[in-house]
Image (cartoon, rainbow, N blue to C red):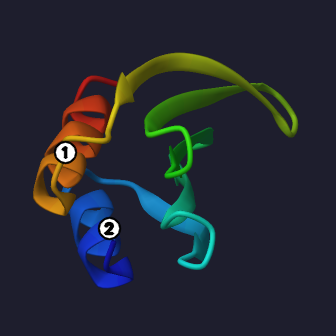
């Protein structure tokens, strides 16, 4: 996943990226910590198990899973669209 594509998508949705971690050597896994106003969220792509997961921070540094999708058949563009859908829903 291209970091610039994730940053562009989050910006279009009114969010700010606080941390991006990319692990291409580990099944193309990555995570994206973002915030809007004072609310923090995280999107994680677990390439090994093929999950795309959306979390919301419910206590400082503690995240609760909101939704997850099986991602093994998703293209990078489809992953971006799913992430965008999640962000526009909050």
Looking at the rendered structure, which numbered label has been put on residue 6? 2
Q: How crowded is mark 2: few (under 14 residues within 10 Å), some or many (20 or more)?
A: some
Q: Provide residue 11's location: percent of width, then percent of height.
A: 28, 65
Image quadrant in which the N terminus is located = bottom left
Q: How crowded is mark 1: few (under 14 residues within 10 Å), some or many (20 or more)?
A: some
Q: In this view, does 26 lie to the left or right of 49?
A: right
Q: Which residue is drawn at 86% across and 40% down?
A: 61
Q: In this view, does 39 lie to the left or right of 69?
A: right
Q: In this view, does 21 lie to the left or right of 90?
A: right
Residue 37 against residue 16 in the figure, above or below: above
Q: Which of 47 and 84 lies nearest the eye of the viewer? A: 47
- Whether residues under marks 1 and 2 lie with C-beta atoms below 8 angstroms apart, the answer is no
Q: Which of 60 and 85 lies nearest the eye of the viewer? A: 85
Looking at the rendered structure, which numbered label has been put on residue 86? none
Mark closer to the chain start, 1 or 2: 2
Q: Provide residue 77's location: percent of width, then percent of height.
A: 12, 58
Q: Provide residue 25's location: percent of width, then percent of height.
A: 60, 78
Q: In which quarter of the image is residue 42?
A: top right
The secondary structure type at the circle numbered 1 is loop
Q: Which of 8 and 81 lies nearest the eye of the viewer? A: 81
Q: In this view, does 2 lie to the left or right of 45?
A: left
Mark 1 or 2: in front is 1
Q: Provide residue 38's location: percent of width, then percent of height.
A: 62, 42
The secondary structure type at the circle numbered 2 is helix
Q: Mark 1 points at which residue?
A: 74
Determine the CA span between mark 1 and mark 2: 15 Å
Q: Which of 47 and 7 lies nearest the eye of the viewer? A: 47
Q: Which residue is drawn at 44% across and 40% down?
A: 50
Image quadrant in which the C terminus is located = top left
Residue 21 against residue 55 in the figure, above or below: below
Q: Residue at x 53, y 63 (%)?
A: 27
């Amino acid at each position: 996943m291209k970091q610039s594509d994730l940053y562009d998508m989050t910006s279009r949705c009114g969010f700010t990226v606080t941390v991006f971690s990319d692990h291409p050597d580990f099944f193309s896994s990555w995570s994206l910590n973002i915030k809007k106003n004072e609310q923090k969220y995280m999107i994680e792509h677990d390439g090994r198990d093929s999950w795309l997961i959306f979390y919301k921070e419910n206590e400082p540094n503690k995240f609760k899973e909101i939704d997850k999708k099986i991602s093994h058949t998703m293209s990078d563009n489809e992953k971006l669209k799913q992430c965008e859908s999640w962000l526009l829903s909050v």
